[in-house]
Amino acid sequence: MNDTYLNFVNSPFGARLARSIGLPKPEVLRRYRADQPEFDGLVAIGAGREPRLLNALAGVIARTGFTSVAHQSAGLWVSLAARHGLMTGRFEPAEAGPHGRVAALIFDASGIEDSGQLDTLFAFFHDTLRSLGKCGRIVVLGRPPEACAGSRQWTAQRALEGLTRSLGKEARRGVTANLVYVAEGAEHEAEATLRFFLSPRSAYVSGQVVRVAANGTSHATTFDWAQPLAGKRAIVTGAARGIGAAIASALSAEGAHVIGIDIPSAKDALDATIRPLGGTALAFDIAAAETPAQIAAALDELGVDIVVHNAGITKDKTIARMTEAAWHSVIDINLSAQERLDDALLAAGTLRDGGRIVCVSSISGIAGNMGQTNYATSKAGVIGRVQSMAIPLGKRNITINAVAPGFIETQMTAKIPLAIREAGRRMNSMSQGGQPVDVAQTIAWLAHPGSAGVTGQVVRVCGQSLIGA
Ligand code: NAD
């Protein structure tokens, strides 16, 4: 789907006009492309007192191919970087700016134990923010507040959320800002998550808080960063078009064999999406009672490693005008069908231990929405599923997470009346809608073998939408 305004204000004439009459100019977001370097340029590193994550971070930065500079708050970085064979220098505002030479700002706040120590964050971002280029990345690292030893430390770590979310709103120009809480013992399990937030793959993910728990398997598992899903089999429901088709492509590009599922009437579109990927197309209505057993049987002893519950519908009306059928079908397709399919795959052992479940929720499920009582109920229920199942599934090393898209340019949102559509599109830090690929790349990160420590979480793919924030 097309954002005519964004294209216009980024054309030579449109950009001139926007400048002269003061129109907002959303940035053309830099997205991942296989033919361009994923990690490129200079990263500025800052740190609070006794940073605990810099050592692991130096390994990640060295492996990605970034170069780095150390802000004066991160004196330790210079020797750590040298140990990891990483060329590094000192951050000099004049040298790094003002032309936005820095690709990412990373601050290790893991050792901060008291609100008085938050001053180092001010010093770092005050000095460096203007040096951050278009579509730059901000990543703040901390410890999960709820695991902190005392109230002071909990308070200071929780404060990082307000800072990170505000940085995302201030920086604009396609910059994302996210906070990663890394649990003690999980220092070397955060690489897949750090890579995602430093990459153009997270172009439309901002203002998010993600927790990485110590799991043990992310670090122990060996995989190829270019094809991390090689040898994996992935179910994607609703794969014929829109976000589902993008998920199928993204997982396939990472090496997975994709089993795409969609309703029988969408069989041709499903085949057109799945055949070029060398995947398997299955025409099933996920709401039919017999479908879960049929899917489990179709997968046979080969089983499956990744299940993406993407299929979803809307039937919008205010509740007084809504029919019971519209209420029921939305809850059934968007929520109950997910439960029935997972139950069948788990009971039959079709979903293998160490697997990944990713459910597509919505910011409507977080904020509620006028005319969407059925849809918002179903999508909030999806969040409940993820939260309630994370611990029991953890016994089999299966993770379950949700993505909550905001306004994504698809046939679903093209149906929204123009004025409401334009508001939904612009009310976020990126001043534009996301693309299906933005949701797909987020799901690919959650499906990654290196994401074993990320479970029970909801990640919004909404460009830091004001709705439900
Ligand atoms: P879409 O309508 O373009 O695609 C949905 C797909 O699901 C279609 O191919 C459809 O045939 C399939 N499907 C519907 N019912 C099915 C059933 N019973 N069995 C099998 N397949 C079925 O929608 P989209 O915009 O790509 O949305 C995908 C998911 O993302 C949905 O869960 C939606 O609620 C969610 N979402 C979308 C947005 C957005 O802005 N587009 C925002 C938030 C959440």
Image (cartoon, grey):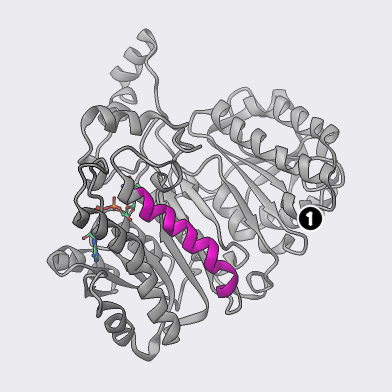
* Magenta span contains residue 427: no
Query: Quadrant location of ligand 1?
Result: bottom left
Q: Is residue 392 above or below residue 441?
A: below
Q: Is residue 33 visible?
A: no
Name the residue at 32% across, 37% down.
370
Q: Which residue is mark 1?
A: 55
Quadrant containing the N terminus in the rendered view: top left
Residue 77, given in percent of the width and then of the height, sits at 81, 46
Please state the horizontal and vertical placement of residue 324, each as a whole percent of the image: 21, 55
Residue type at mark 1?
Asn
Image quarter of residue 421 = top left
In this orientation, which residue lies closer to the viewer: 138 or 79? 138
Is disc 1's CB within 8 Å of ligand 1?
Answer: no
Q: Secondary structure at mark 1?
A: helix
Q: Residues within 10 Å of mark 1 (few under 14, many from 20)?
A: some
In the figure, 313 relative to 22: above or below?
A: below
Figure quadrant of residue 122:
top right
Residue lying furthest top: 20
**Residue 131, percent from left and from top:** 63, 28
Q: Residue at x 71, y 37 (%)?
A: 159
Q: Residue at x 79, y 55 (%)?
A: 55
Q: What span is colored magenta in the figure?
A: 376-393
Q: How many marks?
A: 1
